[in-house]
């Protein structure tokens, strides 16, 4: 990857058929007869997708073979509905993006039909919802869905969208498939009609994999949305790590990304994470789905990044060489979301509302602590050096300086979709710093015996993926399972705006931390001077800036010849040395005297003494961290407990 591409990249970052019995017996008999015919038809042709409709299951077909203008054909056979008017919807927002996407905007020509093929009345309610009248008669819904990558103006975060190429498809189901409102807890059977060369990589259960069709199963809409599928002609690669099958699937238009090479690069991250979490990974499978972008596409918008899912990550990167370190770090961060929020989450995640989500007060935990975990696990597992780790944390301090420190992190989190949307990115900076400070606090109070990871393992074992905590009780839960002083920490530094106590925390670990150090000096005149030895033995003032107070105070005139600077004779070629010696001893506010030779209008020369008041300039260095010259044995032991396994 060349310098330009790297700069742009770094500046911009989831059986058995039953027929529902209706109350009206005549309709029931009629429907059973039709369903039998439809089941026979479905075995003859994928093009006519007419499976048996069930009372508690969705059947969906996505056709990625017969594409028109990057649109896929979608057929949804929902569970039997029992209301006169029903609503079909696609998500307004999905977990992990913290931004409105309105995936319904990519749907075209949505129609609804009864079991006889008669079209039902449909009314579009907004970007993401369609009312379907005569809902009790609804058999199937058909429409086409547009590739979000082609709709750049829609502003969809690429890892959270869909992409269609001749030899690859990024199938984030929420971009193509929706749900009946109030009926998203039912299972989905997904059939994907595809070309013979396209192979899927996903953590979604594969019921059947064939040459021109694959069949998947999801226990509900959340699982369907949470298990993306990467179709690619390129081979994937898998390895077992600490009881989990880790798989990498890639699409690489230039061939820079090879699944087995990427897997080899990220394998140490999973090994370090397993060690950090006590020896095992908290899942039996995990997939990294890497989508490469051509130089042309990437240079248009510089968009790249990743989106976490419970058992997978979608990652979009420029298809350039030299990005191994970036891919490794992104994978580390996204994988740690398997702890938060998969195993530790509030009701807002557990019962996620895809149309009107409620934001948690604890994004500092979901995103910030996850970011910290991804770094500390690498340094404890010898994937990253201590120096690199500390440098990254210092960089996060600098980044956090650019956000509003007077807004508590809990309030920012709750309003991340609204008034404090511009503060959201600070969860990756200050949120990670909160994670570090909380870890250091726990280490200090337990003499190194416990850390933040021990708290998380305890909470993971208490809750897990099928249980949730109440969002506004989370601090109470942490306090109950943490050492003394944690209550003050949470309410001062997270629910409050007190600056994090880095000086105290680093001191306990054998470091000296300075938040800010200013270096003062006096300023040189803002002028241009010329020295040509063959024409004059003096420096000649050729220009000056009278908007600078120090310079203006002298009253220079063009052509003035500098004879002395504050009593020091200025010899040819030595002005810079004279000024440097003066700066070493000069005090701000002192009087500076310059003797010049000035030529008047008649050509006569005279010596003129000019004076001005020395002005001060300073440079500020922030967030300075140094090892103590003589740390105590206790400090070194605490540091070792923090940074080593």
Image: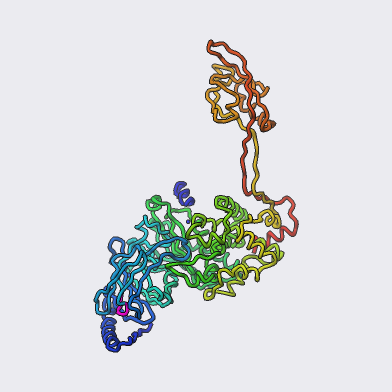
Q: Position of residue 600 (x, y in %)?
A: 55, 13
Task: Say left or right for 604 vs 311.
Answer: right
Give the number of callouts.
Answer: 0
Q: Nearer the viewer, residue 195 or 118?
A: 118
Quadrant assignment, res 203:
bottom left
Q: Which residues are magenta?
A: 135-140
Task: Say left or right for 33 vs 511.
Answer: left
Q: Reply yes or no: does residue 462 show up in magenta.
A: no
Q: Reply yes or no: does residue 136 show up in magenta.
A: yes
Query: Residue at image x 42%, y 73%?
Result: 221
**Residue 232 visible in the snapshot:** no
Q: Nearer the viewer, residue 313 or 396?
A: 396
Quadrant assignment, res 593:
top right
Task: Say left or right for 477 vs 118.
Answer: right
Quadrant assignment, res 63:
bottom left
- Considering only vertical position in the picture, is 503 above or below 544? below
Q: Position of residue 13 (x, y in %)?
A: 47, 56
Q: Quadrant of the C terminus?
A: bottom right
**Residue 291 visible in the snapshot:** yes
Q: Position of residue 356 (x, y in %)?
A: 44, 67
Q: Nearer the viewer, residue 374 or 492?
A: 492
């Amino acid at each position: 990857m060349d310098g330009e591409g790297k700069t742009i990249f770094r500046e911009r970052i989831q059986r058995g058929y039953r027929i529902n019995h209706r109350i009206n017996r005549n309709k029931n008999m009629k429907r059973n007869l039709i369903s039998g015919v439809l089941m026979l038809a479905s075995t003859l042709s994928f093009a006519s997708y007419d499976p048996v409709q069930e009372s508690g299951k969705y059947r969906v077909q996505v056709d990625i073979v017969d594409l028109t203008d990057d649109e896929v054909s979608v057929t949804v056979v929902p569970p039997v509905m029992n209301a006169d008017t029903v609503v079909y919807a696609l998500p307004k927002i999905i977990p992990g993006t913290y931004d409105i996407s309105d995936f319904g905007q990519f749907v075209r020509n949505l129609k609804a039909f009864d079991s006889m093929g008669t079209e039902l009345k449909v009314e579009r309610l907004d970007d993401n919802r369609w009312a379907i009248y005569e809902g009790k008669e609804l058999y199937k819904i058909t429409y086409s869905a547009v590739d979000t990558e082609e709709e750049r103006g829609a502003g969809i975060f690429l890892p959270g969208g869909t992409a269609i190429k001749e030899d690859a498809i990024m199938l984030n189901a929420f971009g193509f498939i929706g749900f009946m409102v109030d009926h998203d807890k039912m299972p989905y059977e997904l059939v994907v009609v595809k070309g013979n060369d396209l192979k899927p990589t996903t953590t979604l259960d594969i019921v059947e994999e064939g040459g021109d069709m694959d069949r998947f199963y999801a226990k509900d809409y959340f699982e369907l949305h949470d298990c993306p599928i990467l179709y690619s002609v390129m081979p994937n690669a898998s390895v077992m790590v600490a009881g989990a099958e880790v798989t990498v699937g890639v699409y690489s238009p230039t061939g820079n990304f090879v699944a087995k090479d990427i897997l080899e690069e990220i394998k140490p991250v999973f090994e370090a994470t397993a060690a950090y979490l006590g020896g095992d990974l908290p899942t039996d499978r995990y997939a990294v789905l890497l989508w490469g972008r051509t130089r042309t596409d990437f240079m248009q918008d510089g968009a790249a990044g990743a989106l976490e899912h419970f058992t997978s990550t979608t990652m979009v990167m420029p298809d350039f060489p030299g990005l191994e370190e970036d891919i490794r770090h992104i994978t580390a961060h996204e994988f740690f979301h398997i702890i938060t929020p998969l195993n530790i989450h509030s009701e807002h995640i557990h019962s996620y509302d895809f149309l009107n989500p409620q934001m948690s007060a604890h994004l500092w935990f979901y995103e910030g602590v996850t970011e910290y975990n991804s770094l500390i696990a690498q340094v404890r597992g010898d994937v990253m050096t201590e120096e690199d780790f500390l440098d990254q944390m210092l960089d996060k301090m600098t980044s956090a300086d650019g956000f509003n420190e007077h807004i508590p992190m809990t309030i920012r989190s709750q309003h991340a979709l609204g008034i404090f949307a511009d503060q959201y990115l600070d969860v990756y900076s200050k949120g990670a710093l909160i994670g570090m400070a909380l870890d250091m606090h726990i280490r200090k109070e337990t003499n190194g015996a416990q850390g933040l990871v021990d708290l998380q393992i305890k909470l993971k074992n208490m809750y897990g993926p099928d249980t949730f905590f109440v969002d506004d009780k989370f601090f109470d839960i942490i306090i109950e399972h943490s050492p003394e002083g944690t209550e003050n920490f949470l309410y001062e530094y997270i629910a409050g705006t007190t600056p994090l106590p880095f000086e105290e925390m680093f001191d306990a670990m054998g470091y000296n931390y300075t938040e800010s150090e200013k270096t003062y000096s006096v300023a040189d005149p803002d002028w241009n001077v010329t020295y040509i030895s063959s024409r004059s033995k003096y420096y000649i003032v050729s220009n000056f800036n009278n908007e600078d107070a120090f310079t203006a105070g002298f009253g220079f005139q063009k052509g003035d010849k500098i004879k002395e600077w504050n009593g020091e004779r200025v010899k040819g070629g030595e002005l810079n040395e004279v000024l440097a010696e003066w700066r070493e001893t000069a005090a701000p506010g002192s009087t500076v005297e310059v003797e010049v030779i000035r030529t008047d209008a008649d050509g006569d020369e005279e010596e003129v003494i000019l004076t001005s008041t020395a002005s001060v300039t300073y440079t500020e260095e922030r967030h300075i961290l140094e090892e103590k010259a003589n740390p105590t044995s206790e400090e070194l032991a605490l540091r070792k407990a923090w940074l080593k396994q």
